[in-house]
Amino acid sequence: MESTDTLQRRGLMFILSSPSGAGKTTVSRMLLRADPEIRLSVSVTTRPQRPGEVDGTDYIFADQPSFDQMVEGDHFLEWAHVFGHSYGTPKAQVKAGLREGHDFLFDIDWQGTQQLYQKLETDVVRVFLLPPSIDELRRRLTGRGTDSADVITARMERARAEISHWDGYDYVVVNDDIDECFAKVQEILHAERMKRARQTGLIGFVRGLMKD
Amino acid sequence: MESTDTLQRRGLMFILSSPSGAGKTTVSRMLLRADPEIRLSVSVTTRPQRPGEVDGTDYIFADQPSFDQMVEGDHFLEWAHVFGHSYGTPKAQVKAGLREGHDFLFDIDWQGTQQLYQKLETDVVRVFLLPPSIDELRRRLTGRGTDSADVITARMERARAEISHWDGYDYVVVNDDIDECFAKVQEILHAERMKRARQTGLIGFVRGLMKD
């Protein structure tokens, strides 16, 4: 007998955003390790490959003309130009994965979030992590105390600019404690998988219940 | 320092529906026992008080003219006439509770669900439980084998009529195993509490983060 766990479902695009220092990268890693159904979408980038990085796994490396051609051809779900390099999420990979019931994790900022939401609204789940306090955020951004006051001020400014977009998200979690925060993010992911509209296998399942 | 758990939030109306025999009553009891933040809304009814029932706790008992007056005055969020008696959910109690951050559990059918949704759409979370198979449903509805075939057939018909409304719900959970089903329902409730739009305390919290 089929259970909900084996019923076919459509995947979802799980977006985690936060200011730098609020735990986004840590929570993303924990989620990818704990949950075999979710994977990181592999971005295309024009930045040079670094030692240890695998083409096709960490990034898909491309030169600028190829990247621009993909933009022209509308092959990206979202793309951005950051610190002199271009980054984009290829559409084909994600669309095929969603149909097959895979979830994708996006560790992106509010601008990427808006682009994804405009393209695939019903598949997108937007989660924003907040630091527990401004003092704690400053402590996390100060790091090992080797940075100048100017550098820290600039980081705080960027963090505040990101925080100001908290209201463009479906869920908000304050990251007081990394384990609690992770547990909450998992509950959101699990609940979203139970949304009727994502459970494409339910139509056939209910048809079975209605027969005698 | 405030955490998300202490941030003010708006309550929600958590609707559990299922055909008889799919575990709605058991899951409701487990939820009320496990979670101090959710309570059962107390219905007004015209049916006679039974021994052991407490007026104001189990039901608010009323005569038919008083009930009809409440309907006239639009004092109910939803009401229905079932087997010769009237039942209704008083509006004032729920609306005040939601503002104070309490959640309400509704163990109601698809008709009550539609009425609630029309009145307070954004506060409503609709969860439907399905039996794992038609054979299992029949087994649960057959009970101790003391009922006639006609009675069982009639119960199966009512169950099927209820099941046919599964697509008017936000979440669907197949109840294979009561503990797993309960865990899933809890995840849905917890995730819904983290919805940005319900966390009314976030505006002040973020304002605090933006100050220096």
Image (tube, coloured by chain):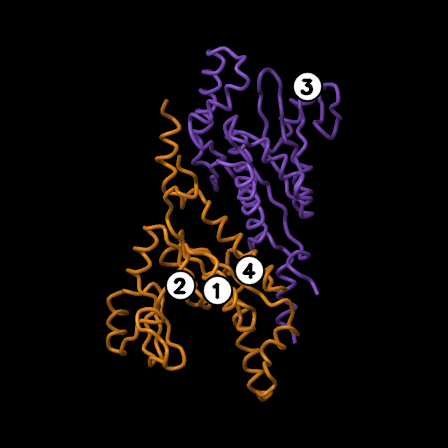
Chain colours: A orange, B purple
Q: Is residue B208 above or below residue B98?
A: below
Q: Which mark is in front, 3 or 2? A: 2
Name which residue type carries label 2: Leu
Q: Where does the image place residue A25, in percent across and percent down from the top left?
A: 49, 69
The residue labelled by disc 2 is A40
Q: Are the residues flagged by discs 1 and 2 in contact, CB closer than 8 Å?
A: yes
Residue plotted at (65% across, 58% down): B201
Q: Which residue is mark 4?
A: A182
Of residues A29 and A82, the one drawn nearer to the viewer in this rendering: A29
Residue toward you, B153 or A54: A54
Measuring from the top left, give residue B155's x and y in whole percent. Answer: 49, 19
Q: Residue at x 51, y 39 (%)?
A: B127
Residue type at the position of mark 3: Pro
Instruction: Tell me which chain the residue with mark 3 is part of.
Output: B
For the C terminus of chain B, the quadrant is bottom right
Residue with the mark numbered 3: B65
Q: Amino acid at mark 1?
A: Ser
Q: Position of residue B199 (x, y in %)?
A: 61, 55
Q: Quadrant of residue A180?
A: bottom right
* Image vertical order of residue A169 relative to residue A203, above or below: below
